[in-house]
Image: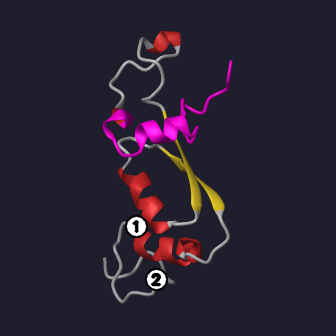
Amino acid sequence: PSKCTRGDCKRERCRPWGHYYDTMYQQRLGPFSRNDTTPFQFLEIGFFQGRGFETYMDYFPRAEAHSMEISCIEHGPREEGKWPFDNFASVNTKWYQRLLDQKRLHCGDAGPRK
């Protein structure tokens, strides 16, 4: 396409499909990436293998970061409210157990609690 899909884009060329993470994150979240910012809480939805979480921890040095992940619920049939696949999150040996111990990795699907 010859026309930018986002008129206020700062770059001369922009991607036609509209992903502007580099500029959006810096514009909106940049102030939180500084060491002199007030401590704050941050929630990531979807820990998966923890690579995004590690990136957020590097980017937000003052954040008390939490993450939600469905794959760390009890293994078993979905009909019983369990997870029938592997626990993807447990492969992250740096953060997985530490976050569970600190009650900062919240296992579940964010549905109503029973």
Q: At x 46% / y 15%, what residue is drawn? A: 78
Q: Which residue is mark 1?
A: 19
Q: At x 58% / y 65%, what residue is drawn? A: 62
Find numbered disc 2 in the image and state the secondary structure of the residue it sits on.
loop
- In this rendering, the answer to whether 46 lies above or below 19 is above
Q: Earlier in the sequence, mark 1 or mark 2?
A: 2
Is residue 20 in view from this perspective? no
Q: Quadrant of the N terminus?
A: bottom left
Is residue 11 in view from this perspective? yes
Q: Position of residue 36 (x, y in %)?
A: 61, 78
Q: At x 45% / y 87%, what residue is drawn? A: 10
Label 1, label 2: how many angstroms apart (C-alpha)?
A: 11 Å
Task: Give the label on residue 9, or none.
Answer: 2
Q: Please state the extent of the stretch shown in magenta in the rendering.
A: 89-114
- In this rendering, the answer to whether 94 lies above or below 112 is below
Task: Give the label on residue 79, or none.
Answer: none
Q: Amino acid at mark 2?
A: Cys
Density class for disc 1 (Cα within 10 Å; few <14, some 14-19, many ≥20) is few
Q: At x 41% / y 12%, what residue is drawn? A: 76
Q: Amino acid at mark 1?
A: His
